[in-house]
Amino acid sequence: MIRLFVALGLPETVRERLALLQAGVPGARWTPPENFHVTLRFLGEVDEPAAEDVDAALRRVEAPSFDLVLDGVGHFGTARKPQTLWAGVDRTEPLRFLHDKVDRASVAAGLPPDDRKFHPHVTLGRLNAAARTDRVGRWLEDNALFRSGPIRVDAFTLYRSHLGSNGPAHEALAEYRLSNLTDQTSPSW
């Protein structure tokens, strides 16, 4: 089985800026900057034939290039039990369009539709019971004005996630160009 997701990678300069936000919450497990991305669709565990079907369906996605803007920070979970710290992404029409196309391609490849609300973000860190959650409010205030962009999005990527004791490692398997769909790389399973 292969654990897959479809996402937008981020340029190194943006990853470096995001990494500067990763402080001020003792006990947080910060995401390594090389793992920063904007998930379009989590596919989960699939077998190799299904992965090949997903790749074929994603190759047929047609969508225009667009600009992406990261804007603000937030958290998932409740105020009393925050679980994930993130940088927000402006929900533009081109981003929603690409998300919907990727979701439809995944369904066409035989996967169930994604019934979760699309909330584009970049995961910066995760909190567990040992994390100093009393510092989250301060972190949110300190970083509320974070903004980067515009970031040109010319492609999206199929990633494999390798789970390990030090957290996940992400491997890019295939890249799918937007607007110029003739220059695509093929994954090696």
Image: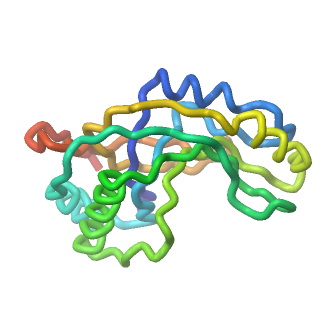
Q: Which colour scheme is used?
A: rainbow
The outermost residue toward the left is 182
What x and y, as percent, mark residue 168?
57, 46
Left or right: 171 in relation to 54: right
What x and y, as percent, mark residue 95?
35, 52
Query: In front here: 165 or 186?
Result: 186
Left or right: 166 in relation to 184: right
Residue that appears at 22% across and 57% down: 58
Whether 140 is drawn above or below 150: the answer is below
Count of numbered labels shown in the rendering? 0
Whether 152 is drawn above or below 27: the answer is above
What x and y, as percent, mark residue 79?
82, 60
Residue that appears at 71% across and 35% down: 143
Whether 179 is drawn above or below 145: the answer is below
Residue that appears at 63% across and 28% down: 19
Whether 39 is drawn above or below 175: the answer is below
What x and y, as percent, mark residue 41?
41, 60
Left or right: 7 in relation to 87: left
Left or right: 35 in relation to 102: right
- In the rendered image, the quadrant that contains the N terminus is bottom left
Residue that appears at 60% across and 43% down: 87
Query: In front here: 125 or 159?
Result: 125
